[in-house]
Amino acid sequence: MAVEIERKFLVCSDSWRAAVEEETHILQGYLAEGSAATVRVRVRGDLAYLTIKGATQGISRLEFEYRIPVEDAEIMLRELAVSPVIEKVRYRVRRGRHLWDLDVFAGENAGLVMAEIELDAEEADFERPDWAGEEVSGDPRYFNVNLAQLPYRRW
């Protein structure tokens, strides 16, 4: 069974930029949103994915992800997305033994910069960088599905 265990933090400085290992432009939209699951389509660079995520329980949730043709994903984003498409640039930064994803949002979510770390277990130890500010793992406003419905700039 695929389980995602993720912690999210607001980013409080730009000091992470010197350690960027990878940068990718991302477009993502939601095809279905509900209390039990969400269905997301994402174009990440020259790859595309269809992802089904279960309801969040603490910092864990079921996640199933499948590669799909980019052309199909683009049509789904344009024709089937039930809320506005989220646009962001994802930067990957290594800290200790973990690879962090830092998302710099654009469009209606411009101004929001979040860091995410995926863990093997909810209680797993990790090195928290100085640029990782307030933890927002449990705040549903910061879930991407909710940022599509009520963007950061409208708060």
Image: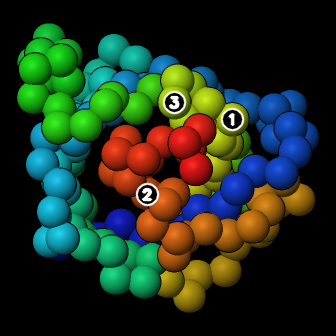
Residue sitting at 18 percent across and 70 percent down? 35
Q: Are marks 2 and 1 in contact (CB under 8 Å)?
A: no
Q: Secondary structure at mark 2?
A: loop
Work out whether residue 94 or residue 149 is closer to the camera in this orientation and state it.
Answer: 149
Q: Secondary structure at mark 3?
A: helix
Q: What type is the residue that disc 3 sits on?
A: Glu
| Mark seen at residue 143 | 2
135 vs 107: above or below: below
Q: Which mark is residue 55?
A: none
> How far apart are the alpha carbons under marks 1 and 3?
9 Å
Indicate which disc, 2 or 1, sits on the residue closer to the N terminus. Answer: 1
- Residue 40 visible in image: yes
- Residue type at mark 1? Gly
Residue under numbered circle 3: 108
Rendered position, 126 above or below 25: below
Q: Is residue 118 left or right of residue 47?
A: right
**Residue placed at 20% from the left, 24% from the top?**
77
- Mark 2, mark 3: which one is toward the viewer? 3
The alpha-carbon separation of the residues under discs 2 and 1 comes to 16 Å
